[in-house]
Amino acid sequence: MDHTLTVWAEDDQGGRSGEVTRKFRVVWNRPPVIDGENKDLGSFMQPPVVNYSATDPEGNNFTFSEYLNGKQIRSFAGVAGQKYTVEISHDAWIRLDLDVQHQIKIVATDSAEISSERIYTFTRKETHIEFMLEYGNPDIKADFTLDGMPLRVLVTLERYLPEGSSIESVKVCNNYLDDVPTWEDCTGAVKGNRGYLFTNKNKTAPEWAINLWVTIDKGTARERVLVNGYGGAFD
């Protein structure tokens, strides 16, 4: 629908200028519509799956931008009605603090720079802490790969275990480079701050290699369980 704008000037003596007329049309532009609604997704031990799609009321092109706690994950051109999934990488996931709220935000921006957003919140939780030595790190592999057979190992954990939590297990092996390493339970020795004597005397790989596998159970603890590091020795 066309509209008409007429402009003129009048002075205090009753003089009036000629009119200038301009026609114009109002084109309404609404932001893209992202499906779903803002909500809290709950608590997760694995990255939550968030699917979404959007349409634009005027049929304009639009782009999506995904954010995790305000940091952009990706930005790309969207297709109206097509489903997309927010993917949180493993590296990003394990860096998220436990037991606090985090935010996933999806922003759809059309070609006129009009945008809408969808916000989801969630909490990361864990019942266990579990870790091993990372042999993909060349420094670790060099430090724990040996020419001779290791006979014993001492493992120490720099830890804070609040009431209700515990060391569930600590396992060690001296043939980690084998296809099937021989894991031995040394939980009692670690809890007692004692060294552990390996029982395994065999390997199939060219070299001996030590690794450890630690599992901490949060149990009923209300405080955060902390493992700040590890130490020890072997011979």
Image (spheres, helix red, strand yellow):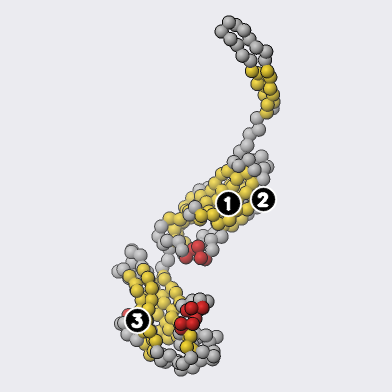
Q: Residue 190 carries which label?
A: 3
User: Dot 2: within a 10 Å radius of its alpha carbon, few (fewer than 14), some, or many (20 or more) residues?
Assistant: some
Residue type marked 3? Val
User: Dot 1: within a 10 Å radius of its alpha carbon, few (fewer than 14), some, or many (20 or more) residues?
Assistant: some
Q: Earlier in the sequence, mark 3 or mark 2?
A: 2
Q: Which mark is residue 79?
A: 2
Q: Relative to residue 151, is residue 105 drawn left or right?
A: right
Q: Residue 65 carries which label?
A: 1
Q: Which residue lies furthest to the bottom in this view?
A: 201
Q: Relative to residue 167, is residue 83 drawn left or right?
A: right
- Separation (CA) of disc 1 from disc 3: 48 Å
Residue type marked 2? Val
The residue depicted at 33 percent of the width and 63 percent of the height is 222
The residue depicted at 41 percent of the width and 62 percent of the height is 98
Q: Residue 72 at what x, y percent from top left?
A: 54, 54
SS state under label 3:
helix
Q: Which mark is residue 200?
A: none
Residue type marked 1? Ser
